[in-house]
């Protein structure tokens, strides 16, 4: 089941990168919980509950950025959770500001659906939360 969980998360992130919000959210349970554990100042500690809240969050993210992409650096099987370490690269729509940083997403999977997403602004914190270190094997995006 663990490899299936990794592939589910990979598929959700691929949909995210295509801007296909419906497909991305389709990998999540209806009552999915999204928590900004340590993330954007405006939403840190905020918990979004439900697929519609997840959809609204992604829509506002895509509205704010002219370009937005997550380069998946690592997917790591952590039992019923999958750790995704990504490089976020974006250009602001109004400001033109460019960002390039590493995030960690710890996603809990149950019955073939993502039921919880914990977003960490610093990949090292996500690695610690998942109980894996920087030496965890990297999985290629093939």
Image (spheres, rainbow, N blue to C red):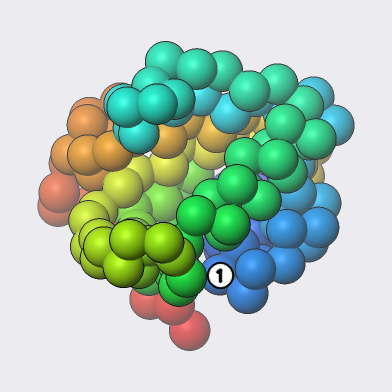
* In this view, 85 is above or below 97: above
In this view of the protein, which residue sits in the foreground, 141 or 56?
56
Residue 13, image quadrant: bottom right
Q: Is residue 6 visible?
A: no
Q: Going by the image, does 86 lie left or right of 3?
A: left
Q: Is residue 84 visible?
A: yes
Give the SS element for disc 1: helix
Farthest front residue in view: 94
Residue carrying label 1: 17
* In this view, 103 is above or below 13: above
Residue 55, image quadrant: top right
Label 1 CA crowd tier, 10 Å (few <14, some 14–19, many 20+):
some
Q: Position of residue 131 (x, y in %)?
A: 28, 29
Count every numbered label the image shows and give the total.
Answer: 1
Q: Position of residue 109 (x, y in %)?
A: 65, 37
Q: Position of residue 113 (x, y in %)?
A: 75, 41
Q: Give the residue at x 44% y 65%.
A: 93
């Amino acid at each position: 089941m663990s490899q299936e969980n990794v592939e589910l998360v990979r598929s959700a992130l691929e949909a995210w990168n295509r801007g296909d919000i419906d497909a991305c959210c389709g990998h999540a349970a209806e009552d999915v919980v999204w928590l900004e554990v340590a993330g954007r100042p405006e939403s840190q500690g905020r918990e979004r509950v439900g697929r519609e809240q997840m959809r609204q969050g992604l829509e506002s993210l895509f509205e704010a950025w002219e370009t937005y992409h997550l380069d998946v650096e690592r997917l790591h099987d952590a039992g019923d959770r999958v750790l995704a370490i990504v490089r976020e690269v974006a250009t602001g729509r109004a400001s033109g500001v460019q960002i390039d940083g590493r995030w960690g997403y710890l996603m809990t999977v149950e019955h073939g659906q993502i039921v919880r997403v914990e977003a960490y602004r610093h990949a090292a914190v996500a690695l610690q939360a998942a109980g894996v270190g920087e030496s965890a094997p990297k999985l290629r995006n093939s």
